Image (cartoon, grey):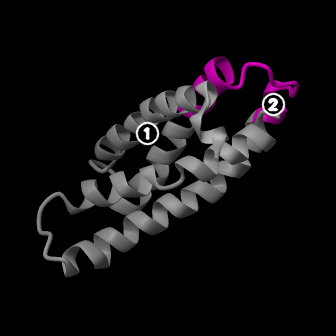
Amino acid sequence: MQLFFSRQFLIFLLTGGLAALVNFGSRIIYSEWLSYSSAILAAYVTGMVTAFLLARTLVFTSTQQSLQRSFADFSMINVLAVIQVWGISMLLASYLLPAMGFTQNIEEIAHAAGVIFPVFTSYLGHKYWSFR
């Protein structure tokens, strides 16, 4: 548990938070041209590239892996995370929030919840695999 109370995890949260804002904001922009579902996926890629650049330069600075290997591993971890983000966002927007009586900002609330969900699983994956 001390792993989640480290300086490295705090920096990961801050850089991940910035990448999440890029993800969230770009989804709103992409929604002008794409369906909600497609916009989530496109925004995730935008946020993922941002997250990789920040993580590589500010969080996991002592990695021994090459840039290409780190990006490949980072991408694999994010395939699992995007499944979580997309699934949670779609479930909330399509079923749970309307069933709870929400009528406004459903897509934004659902997407924000989806983006927040994989923080801990992603940190562990990146620490022990992407940037080991």
Q: Quadrant of the C terminus?
A: top right
Q: Which secondary structure lies at badge 2?
A: helix
Residue 16 percent coordinates (x, y): 50, 34
**Would you identify the image quadrant in which residue 2 lies?**
top right
- Membership of 8 in magenta stretch: no
Horizontal side, residue 26 vs residue 128: left or right = left
Specify the principal SS of the magenta part: helix
Q: Is residue 7 left or right of residue 27?
A: right
Q: Quadrant of residue 55?
A: top right
Tell me if residue 58 is in the magenta stretch: yes
Q: Who's the residue at 55% across and 25% down the image?
A: 11
Amino acid at the residue labelled 2: Gln
Can you tell which of label 2 and label 1 is closer to the viewer? 1
Residue 34 visible here: no
**Residue drawn at point x = 58 percent, y = 24 percent:** 54
Q: Position of residue 114 (x, y in %)?
A: 42, 57
The residue that label 2 is drawn on is 68
Residue 64's place in the image compared with 74, above or below, is: above
Q: Which residues are magenta?
A: 49-70
Work out whether residue 127 can be spotted: yes
- Which label was assigned to residue 20? 1
